[in-house]
Image (cartoon, rainbow, N blue to C red):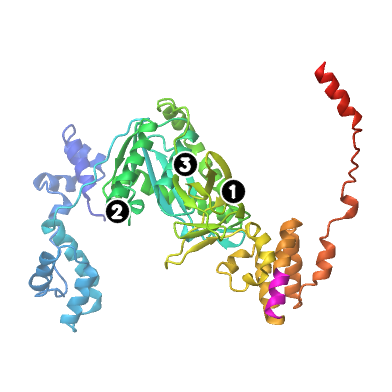
Amino acid sequence: MPGRHVNDHQMRLYMKFRHTHAVPVAAAKAGISTATAYRIEGDPRLPSQKQAQRERRRPDPLAGIFEEEVVPLLQAAPGIRVVAIFEEMLRRHPDLDAGIRRTLERRIRAWRAIHGPEQEVIFRQTHEPGRLGLSDFTEMKDEEVTVAGVPLDHRLYHFRLMWSGFEHAHVILGGESYVALAEGLQNALWAVGGAPTEHRSDSLSAAFRNLDADARQDLTLRYDALCEHYGMTPTRNNRGIAHENGGIESPHGHLKAAIKDALLMRGSRDFDDLASYRHFIDEVVSRKNRRNGPRIDAERAVLQPLPGARTSDYEETIVTVTSSSSFTLRKVFYTVPSRLIGHRLRVRLYDDRLDLFIGGTHLMTLRRGRSFNNGAHGHVVDYRHVIHSLRRKPMALLKLVYRDQLFPREPYHQTFDRLIAALPERTACRQMVELLAMAHERACEAELAELLAADVAADRLPDMDALRKRFAPDPAALPDVVVELVPLATYDVLLTGEAA
């Protein structure tokens, strides 16, 4: 076109058409003039090749510095950050302009491309359906989830089938452990309906921490036995090399992003109980799985069949109930009914609960407690276990080691503080123990807590007479039992009939 420079594209078109057309025709097809075409015939170089190399228009700010000072630093410490070199150069040369940072970054990047060390290469893998399943744990602190107003300290166990993208997530209350892995993995396998031929984990690094050699060996054997039960070959990626488990590390971020979006749409991060939160997580994961439904169905068809039953996903130990109607396990103090004092109990530890057995008989299930990071013991206390003895010794409440954990709800704790401040210690302890006994015997713990909270808000002490009257049994509701005595002659008839 007149008044416009010929570009490389037009010249290449001209050269292409020139093979089959005359100069005027090829020039017209390429959009250039005939005169320009004849000039190209005399000089076939591209326009970009004719341009003179751009010369520096200002002095090099790194002259006498880069080769003499920066390069030796890069050679001595290949992993040093650019910003560290930049700050060092400013320290050595105060007259340097701070605006040279981008120039320095480009120059170092170019130097490393030519002279830098070899970098680790990531080898992309092909995957077959039914072959590989991956497990890992991911933190959930940033989501700030609460249960009944209390922050929930938890993480997620995350399982994924590599080929189809099937996912399963399980809320873990404790740390990374064999119990958490075994429970989450088995839940995932039974949810998908089959097992892959290989299972890869992240070396259970957190589970192995602080264990001696024998305990580590035992944990390894149990993990191997778990995989063998489902016909899977256990593999582990190298510790500290996250990309070797990249098939699960990257989906962590996608899963947590989906959970975050779902929490925002829900409008609240508080849940009534742990079961509600777990149901919420299951719904989020199910929606993700529905998007991969056809692939999951295809992979499910080639998974190994599941065994007849699950294997153990708990740890088992023996404890003795002390005279304080309690036992201590993993630095956590648990209360149990006093009838178990002196007995040896078999305890199955799950991630979120303890199952207690005496012999082969299941006694009860307790919430699993956790010790604190500072080494302090945790407490799982149920006032119902000790209230009958506490009624006979109400002053024991005053200095009780686990007194704060004994109160089932916060209004009870606040009421006791007010009673201690306003009444003699003996009277305050006696009234508080009576309130706890009332909550237990009349099954009115929640209703009584509401009344106590109202008293605290009104800055008054509880009216014990009114509470006794309110929660006393209703005589009209008591059954009228009439016992009719059988005449003794009836027994003679029975004996006579038996002899016949």
Report the Cα–Cα distance between label 3 and label 2. 32 Å
Residue 452 visible to an observer of this rendering = yes
Task: Estimate how packed mark 1 is, as few (under 14), some (14 to 19) or many (20 or more) residues with alpha carbons within 10 Å.
Answer: few
Task: Estimate how packed mark 3 is, as few (under 14), some (14 to 19) or many (20 or more) residues with alpha carbons within 10 Å.
Answer: many
Residue at label 2? 212
Name which of mark 1 and mark 3 comes first in the sequence.
3
Q: In front: mark 3 or mark 2?
A: 2
Query: What residue span does the magenta drawing correspond to?
Result: 424-432
Name which of mark 2 and mark 1 comes first in the sequence.
2
Residue 33 visible to an observer of this rendering = no
In front here: 199 or 319? 319
Rendered location of residue 500, percent (x, y): 82, 15
In this rendering, position of residue 350 left or right of residue 403? left
Residue at label 1? 275
Rendered location of residue 103, percent (x, y): 21, 69
Q: Secondary structure at mark 1?
A: helix
Task: Estimate how packed mark 2 is, as few (under 14), some (14 to 19) or many (20 or more) residues with alpha carbons within 10 Å.
Answer: few
Q: In front: mark 2 or mark 1?
A: 2
Q: Tell me the amino acid under the disc marked 1.
A: Ala
Q: Residue at x 86, y 28 (%)?
A: 491
Q: Tell me the amino acid under the disc marked 3.
A: His
In front here: 269 or 212? 212
Q: In front: mark 1 or mark 3?
A: 1
Is-magenta flag for residue 97?
A: no
Marks 1/3 in contact by CB < 8 Å: the verdict is: no
Rendered location of residue 460, percent (x, y): 76, 77
